[in-house]
DNA sequence: CAATCATATGCCTATATCGGCATGCGTCAA
DNA sequence: TTGACGCATGCCGATATAGGCATATGATTG
């Protein structure tokens, strides 16, 4: 009983910073593993492992091109995350009022104490 | 050497489904711990622990109200996540033409930088 | 002060990653 | 076929995290 596996939940998959970096790089187009690894300053096995996770959650796909394996972005899986966070947009925009009243409460409490 | 701690990285904090549920519930307003626990079908210690994580990353705040401790939403921390995923919007929405030109822009920018 | 309600924590176990290193596997060139 | 290159995996160690249960802590009431 822990959180859903990184390989099955996009939220969890992108919780790892290096995987986010990989996704960002892939916006510029397909890349072979070694190139990604080098640009991100990580070893090849490490890059491969992260790419595997991303592939299993469907955020990237790959195709064989000669000796290389090109990884490409499939960002559709990020849409749910964008939409979920979007559901809170009102709250971070509107936070002036809420924050303000919260601050007032704090001041009040302190003065009373 | 693992991913950033759940207590310091919003991406990681919301990687846990139950914490996302808590945040959703809090959109309806402040709630005491026990009420949250009950509505989500989890034990009180469990709810408290999740709330602690959320508090440490700044997604919720709490104030004492008599014997209870009311937790409230502070969604500002979700904005970066929304924006980050938003950076991929063109890749799941737009036509391939526009996507193409966007990619060209990225390449250009990268070369200039 | 004692009893009680509402929460927060500590301790322990099971499980999940992450990263390194060595190595297996597939492809291409000679 | 052999050797080199590119990448995927297996295995191991270290660490993080989730959840349970019992218990400590803080506030309120009698």
Image (spheres, coloured by chain):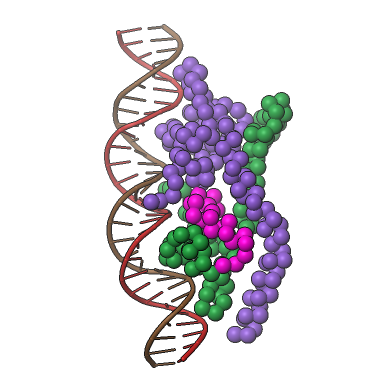
Chain colours: A purple, B green, C brown, D red
Q: Report x, y in % for residue A46.
A: 43, 36
Q: Is residue D16 left or right of residue B65?
A: left
Q: Residue at x 61, y 53 (%)?
A: B78
**Residue B85 position (above or below residue B65):** above
The answer to whether A90 appears left or right of A18 in the picture is right
Q: Is residue B11 magenta?
A: yes
Instruction: Using the rendered view, name the quadrant where residue A112 is placed.
Output: bottom right
Q: Can the viewer see residue B56?
A: no
Q: Please say whether residue A9 is visible from this viewpoint.
A: yes
Image quadrant holding the C terminus of chain B, namely top right
Number of marks in the rendered image: 0
Q: Quadrant of residue A108?
A: bottom right
Comparing A1 with A63, the one in front is A1
Q: Residue, x 57% and y 31% (percent of image)?
A: A73
Stretch of the chain drawn in magenta? B8-31
- Image-based side of C24 in relation to A54, left or right: left
Q: Is residue B64 above or below residue B105?
A: below
Q: Which quarter of the figure has residue B24? A: bottom right
Residue drawn at x 49%, y 36% is: A57
Q: Nearer the viewer, residue D27 or A108?
A: D27
Q: Residue B64: say if magenta.
A: no
Viewer-proximal residue, B91 or B8?
B91
Residue A47 appears at what percent x and percent y? 46, 34
Image point (48%, 64%), residue name? B38
Q: Position of residue B47 (x, y in %)?
A: 47, 63
């Amino acid at each position: 009983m822990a959180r859903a596996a990184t390989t099955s939940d996009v939220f969890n998959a992108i919780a790892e910073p290096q995987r986010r970096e990989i996704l960002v790089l892939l916006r510029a187009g397909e890349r072979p593993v070694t190139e990604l690894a080098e640009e991100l300053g990580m070893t090849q096995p490490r890059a491969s492992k992260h790419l595997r996770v991303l592939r299993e959650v469907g955020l990237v796909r790959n195709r064989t091109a000669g000796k290389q394996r090109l990884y490409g972005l499939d960002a559709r899986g990020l849409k749910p995350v964008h939409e979920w966070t979007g559901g809170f947009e009102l709250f971070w925009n509107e936070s002036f009022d809420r924050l303000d009243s919260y601050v007032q409460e704090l001041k009040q409490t302190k003065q009373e104490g």
